[in-house]
């Protein structure tokens, strides 16, 4: 295979229509586009009128955060796995911070903000809260559409109400090489909404195993499905295998909202998705229990071959 990475423009779907409500012609039209995009790529670009208004304040907030002294960033800790601050020395290939239950405003302000800025930082908090609100509304629409596509929309309210949103902010130093800054993987959560700065780097693997560089629009979010949703759908959709390669010298910033099933909620394949043709592939699981086991295996260096689908496979 050539060392040159092909360029792909993910399907672009317009979510800015004011009439985008369940049952409307606009909803059904967008839902069809969502199905085609997810079956083809496992992800797509979602355009929204408000995204450009967020660009400068949100990306500016990320720069403010990562410009803080290391000892300040290390103050943000959590007793839950895969939350808190992770520096580049932690082996994750990026500098990042993960905020739990980000839809609860108090977890941003004062929770995160006053930890990093004891005197407060109103503009920082406002920028993150605005992103979370816009991205979570989009995520709920997309997930409701997916459930309608497969005829299991009766579970939508319960499923969506059992969601915890993690906010993850990321910084990738330009490596100047073709080595991945973030290793190839598929997300383990339900869905992911990403919003990077202008620096390219996201690559997805197509069905032929070839890596393709994603070109993005500044007024769109990237929407991906994760392994948890694939399991809930009994394998009807597959998440994209992706990585980040920062070949230049510019810093890449990205912010993401990750939907996960709240602890105590059993992610279980609906009976409607199991029949004589499609046998049950996965047993019910608690995502937080999976994360605890996952973090234990990471600490022991025993992660090889372990993932969500192997964890809950029948």
Image: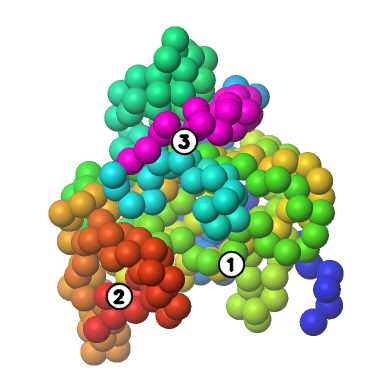
Position of the C terminus by quadrant: bottom left
Residue 27 is situated, as x and y percent measured from the top left of the image, at 43, 46
Please say whether residue 47 is visible from this viewpoint: yes
The vertical placement of 66 against 146, above or below, is above
User: Separation of disc 3 and disc 2 at Cα?
Assistant: 31 Å
Q: Residue 244 sits in which quadrant?
A: bottom right
Q: Residues within 10 Å of mark 3 (few under 14, many from 20)?
A: some
Kind of element beneath mark 2: helix
Q: Nearer the viewer, mark 3 or mark 1?
A: 3
SS assignment for the magenta stretch, majority: helix
Residue that numbered label 1 is attached to: 184
Pointer 2 residue: 311
Judge by depth and name the residue closer to the eye, 250 or 39.
Answer: 250
The residue that label 3 is drawn on is 74
Highlighted magenta segment, given as a residue range: 58-78
Is 212 above or below relative to 63?
below
Q: CA distance from mark 3 to mark 1?
A: 26 Å
* Category of crowding for the residue at label 2, using alpha-carbon neighbours closer than 10 angstroms: few (below 14), some (14–19), many (at least 20): some
**Direction bottom: furthest residue:** 276
Q: Could you say where residue 79 lies in the image, as x and y percent from the top left? A: 28, 44
Where does residue 92 sit, x and y in percent of width and height?
A: 54, 56
Query: CA gap, disc 2 to disc 1?
Result: 19 Å
Viewport quadrant of the N terminus: bottom right
| Image x and y of residue 296, in percent | 32, 64
Mark identifier at residue 259 = none
Instruction: Pick whichever of labels 3 and 2 is earlier in the sequence.
Output: 3
Among all residues in the image, which is located at the extreme front?
71
Under tag 1, what secondary structure?
strand
């Amino acid at each position: 295979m050539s060392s040159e990475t092909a360029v792909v423009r993910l399907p672009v779907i317009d979510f800015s229509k004011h009439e985008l409500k369940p049952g409307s012609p606009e909803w059904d039209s967008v839902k069809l586009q969502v199905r085609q995009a997810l079956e083809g790529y496992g992800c797509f670009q979602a355009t929204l009128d408000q995204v450009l208004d967020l660009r400068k304040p949100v990306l500016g907030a990320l720069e403010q955060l990562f410009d803080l002294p290391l000892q300040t960033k290390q103050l943000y800790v959590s007793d839950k796995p895969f939350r808190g601050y992770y520096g580049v020395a932690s082996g994750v290939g990026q500098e990042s911070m993960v905020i739990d239950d980000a839809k609860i405003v108090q977890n941003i302000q004062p929770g995160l903000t006053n930890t990093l800025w004891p005197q407060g930082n109103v503009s920082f908090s406002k920028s993150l809260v605005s992103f979370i609100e816009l991205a979570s509304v989009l995520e709920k629409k997309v997930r409701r559409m997916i459930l309608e596509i497969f005829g299991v929309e009766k579970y939508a309210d319960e499923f969506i109400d059992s969601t915890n949103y993690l906010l993850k902010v990321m910084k990738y130093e330009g490596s100047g090489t073709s080595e991945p800054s973030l290793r190839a993987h598929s997300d383990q959560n339900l869905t992911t909404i990403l919003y990077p700065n202008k620096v390219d780097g996201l690559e997805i693997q197509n069905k032929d195993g070839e890596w393709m560089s994603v070109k993005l629009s500044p007024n769109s979010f990237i929407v991906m499905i994760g392994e948890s949703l694939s399991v809930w759908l009994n394998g009807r959709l597959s998440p994209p295998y992706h990585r980040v390669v920062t070949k230049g010298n510019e810093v890449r910033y990205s912010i993401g909202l990750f939907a996960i099933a709240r602890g105590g909620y059993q992610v279980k394949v609906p009976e409607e998705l199991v029949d004589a043709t499609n046998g049950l592939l996965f047993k019910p699981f608690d995502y937080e229990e999976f994360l605890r086991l996952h973090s234990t295996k990471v600490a022991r260096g025993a992660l090889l071959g372990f993932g969500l689908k192997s964890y809950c496979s029948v």
